Image: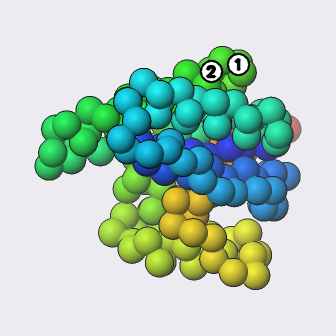
Amino acid sequence: MRWIGIDPGLRTTGFGVIDVDGQKLTYVASGTIESGDPAKGLPERLGTLYAGVKEVLETYLPEAAAIEEVFLNVNPRSTLMLGQARGAVIAALVSENLSVAEYSALRVKQSIVGTGRATKPQVQEMVKRLLRLSRAPGTDAADALGVAICAAHHAQVPKVTTTVLASKKRSRSLS
């Protein structure tokens, strides 16, 4: 299954695409989408993010998507603008009929590094190791790849649980 992870931002939105085959994770692509000059109007910048995400989707054809949730910032205006950027990204994802999973930054860090207080360099290093990359991706791309890896791990949990429960039922009925 091919996942795209998104780390939304108004200036820079990170994306990461991975293939998942059982427990095997394979790096496909990652990068950033820049919304352009902050002097431009907000609608134009949101349109740029939307178009950039659509281009990435058309290029890599993911089957599912995951995005980092917005955290409350000290500055309400910044939080609101980030929410609008996230909305433009989600609109692009659902316009391609993708299911979209949402994960908090804490949950992503716990899934990748093992602690919700991990630093950006720690996330970058673990993403590098998990995907067997020759060098660590940039911070926005690493965060997006982390979101995709988190989603891939959590998407497998129900399947594993269902398989284990089914095998236990079969072994009980054979007894």
Q: Which mark is residue 124?
A: none
Q: How is the image coloured?
A: rainbow
Q: Going by the image, does 161 lie left or right of 103?
A: right
Q: Which residue is mark 1?
A: 97
> Which quadrant of the rendered structure holds the C terminus?
top right
Q: Is residue 128 left or right of residue 101?
A: right
Point out residue 79 in the picture as x, y percentages from the top left corner.
Answer: 26, 39
Q: Secondary structure at mark 1?
A: loop
Q: Residue at x 48, y 77 (%)?
A: 122
Which residue is nearer to you in this view: 158 or 151? 151
Residue 166 showing in the rendered view: no
Q: Nearest the camera: 131 or 78?
A: 78
Left or right: 128 in relation to 80: right
Q: Amino acid at mark 1?
A: Asn
Instruction: Please report the residue visible at 37 percent of the width from the left and 64 percent of the height from the top.
Output: 116
Task: Tell me the kind of residue under disc 2.
Answer: Val
Identified at 65% across, 57% down, the residue is 31
Tag 2 secondary structure = helix
Give the distance between the C-alpha atoms of the residues marked 2 and 1, in whole angstroms.
5 Å
Residue at image position (63%, 70%) is 137
CB contact under 8 Å: marks 2 and 1: yes
**Residue 145 horizontal/vertical position (percent):** 62, 57
Near mark 1 (Cα within 10 A), the count class, few <14, some 14-19 or many ≥20, is few
Q: Residue 16, how many percent across, how many down?
A: 66, 53
User: How many residues crowd around disc 2 within 10 Å: few (fewer than 14), some, or many (20 or more)?
Assistant: few
Residue marked by disc 2: 94
Q: Nearer the viewer, residue 170 or 27?
A: 27
Quadrant of the image for the N terminus? Answer: top right
For residue 123, above or below residue 143: below
Residue 109 visible in the shown view: yes
Seen as rendered, the residue at the extreme bottom is 134
